[in-house]
Amino acid sequence: MNDSRNLDLRSIRKTPWAWTVATFFGTGLLRPGPGTWGSVAATLLFSSLVAVFHPPAPQLLALTLVGILLAVATGIPAATIAARECAGKDPGFVVIDEVAGVWIALLAAIPHPDWKHILAALLLFRAFDIAKPFPIRLIEKLPAGFGIVCDDLAAGLYAGAGVLLLARWL
């Protein structure tokens, strides 16, 4: 669960690269609901890629997978550093986990990357990220950045499965 303490982030000594990644270029500093802002930013990035470049499904899949891998590979150490520097377990401003999670959910929208499938992925991801059904709450207890990031990866898998089920009616 995200730490909800009111922190004065200005007084914290920050590792610049880690905070840039952890907050997804500052998106996690937006209020209210930084996790939602991070998820929306990642979804808009995906949607913009689709709208501007119209990549074929295999290319979109490859680009999304690379994005997920980069978010996870940089997000785990960045989340660990940012959490340690603010003395929090899962600070709300860390949203790189939401970025990776919603991109996992969006994998299910790739065969039909229209607004309905993309919106379904976003909404289902946020629902699973907030509700944390079994075993997501257990995954959240992993140490440091692993717990911060990996629970959202699981929420992304649940949301992706939901998008695949809903795809029959969308």
Image: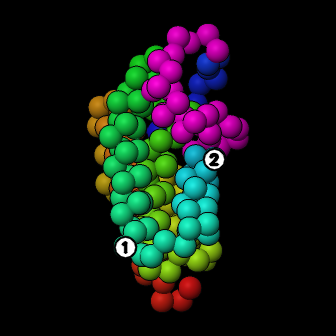
Q: Dividing the picture into quarters, in which one does residue 71 lie?
A: top left
Residue placed at 44% from the left, 79% from the top?
Answer: 111
Residue 95 percent across, percent down from the top left:
52, 40
Q: Which residue lies furthest to the bottom in this view?
A: 168
Question: In the rendered structure, which amino acid carries the disc numbered 2?
Answer: Trp
Q: Mark 1 points at which residue?
A: 58
Question: In the rendered structure, which amino acid carries the disc numbered 1?
Answer: Pro
- Please report the bounds of the magenta region as a residue range: 10-36
At mark 2, the secondary structure is: helix
User: Can you say which quadrant of the picture contains the C terminus?
Assistant: bottom right
User: With 103 as the anchor, is 93 left or right in this view?
Assistant: right
Cα–Cα span, label 2 and label 1: 28 Å
Q: Is residue 34 one of those drawn in magenta?
A: yes
Depicted 70 relative to depicted 92: above or below: below
Residue 108 percent across, percent down from the top left:
42, 72
Q: Residue furthest front?
A: 53
User: With 78 as the anchor, is 16 left or right in this view?
Assistant: right
Q: Mark 2 points at which residue?
A: 37
Q: Which of 81 and 65 is in front in this view?
A: 65
